[in-house]
Image: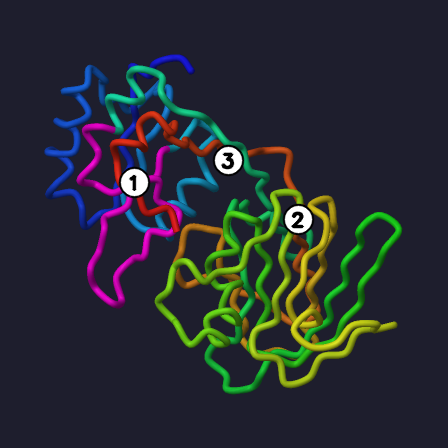
Amino acid sequence: MRGINKILLLAESELQSTERSISKEIENAGIRIVKRNAEAAIVVGGDGTFGFYGSRNNMPLLFVGMGSHSELGSKGVLAELHLDKIAEAAKALKEGRYLIEEYNRLGVKVGGVKKGETFTDIYVQRGVESNALRYELDIQAGEKRISEFAISDGIIVTTSIGASGYFSYPDKIVSGKMFDEKGVAVISRDEIGICHILPTYLHRENKTKRGLQLFRYTVPMYSKILIKLRREAHARLYGVGHSRKGINAPANMEIEVSAERSHTKRIKLTPALKAGVETDTG
């Protein structure tokens, strides 16, 4: 790959105090930190930060984790490496020792109005009311159609890169290892994952399969997914938009999720660099 000379540095707000030292490590490799016309970006933070910037930037992105040792700190499953290896990573970018992987994004509309894109996952979950969500799910995948009716805490729709997050909650329940970054679901890049959150009722028209495969499964990437709440429950849509409080998801208004033409470009360091750098990619 071509060597990178200009980088945009994107970091979580709590890292501003160390941003100067991070910038120095990058500049020591001969790379300029710029605000405009960057050839790539280094994103420093946790999985939430990676998902946020990865859904909004078209340039190649290198995800650098903070390496938190806290039980409740970021696990950085999507990180290519951690902060202590930033100098080696910057040198590799300068010398062109990296690859770029492209991932489809999912576009999300509410009532026909586009609310944003994600390259990880979105989920609809109940809000301030104690009532569970009652909703219909309609999926059109070419000639195949899936129609479901559910009562649950919500529903998750994910790409392959987001499958290690909320989509993997059944794996963690079964294994009993809630903080094991290795015990996660894996789906292919040409699939979308669907998972109902703690369903108490679930019915599929013309159902042929039972059990886990019914409340969590995959569909082709080209599928069109429609979610319609059947009762008002102050539900929120998370994963798109700029607020951590989510977006209002009113009853009887369709939430549409489908693949976008845009892609997220994720930088992967080549094996030659990894031989000398211990990484934790999850």
- Which contiguous range is marked in magenta? 62-88
Rate crowding at label 1 as few (under 14), some (14 to 19) or many (20 or more) other CA atoms within 10 Å.
many
Contact between labelled residues 1 and 3, with CB atoms less than 8 Å apart: no
- What residue is at 25 percent from the left and 25 percent from the top? 90
Mark 1 or mark 2: whose residue is earlier in sequence:
1
Q: Which residue is mark 2?
A: 191
**Mark linked to residue 189:** none
Q: Amino acid at mark 1?
A: Leu
Mark 2 or mark 3: whose residue is earlier in sequence:
2
In this picture, residue 259 sits left or right of residue 148: left
The quadrant where residue 23 appears: top left
Separation of marks 3 and 1 at Cα, in angstroms = 18 Å
Q: Is residue 88 above or below residue 227?
A: above
Q: Which residue is mark 3?
A: 264
Q: Is residue 48 above or below residue 210?
A: above
Separation of marks 2 and 3 at Cα, in angstroms = 16 Å
Rate crowding at label 2 as few (under 14), some (14 to 19) or many (20 or more) other CA atoms within 10 Å.
some
Q: Amino acid at mark 2?
A: Glu
**Mark linked to residue 81:** 1
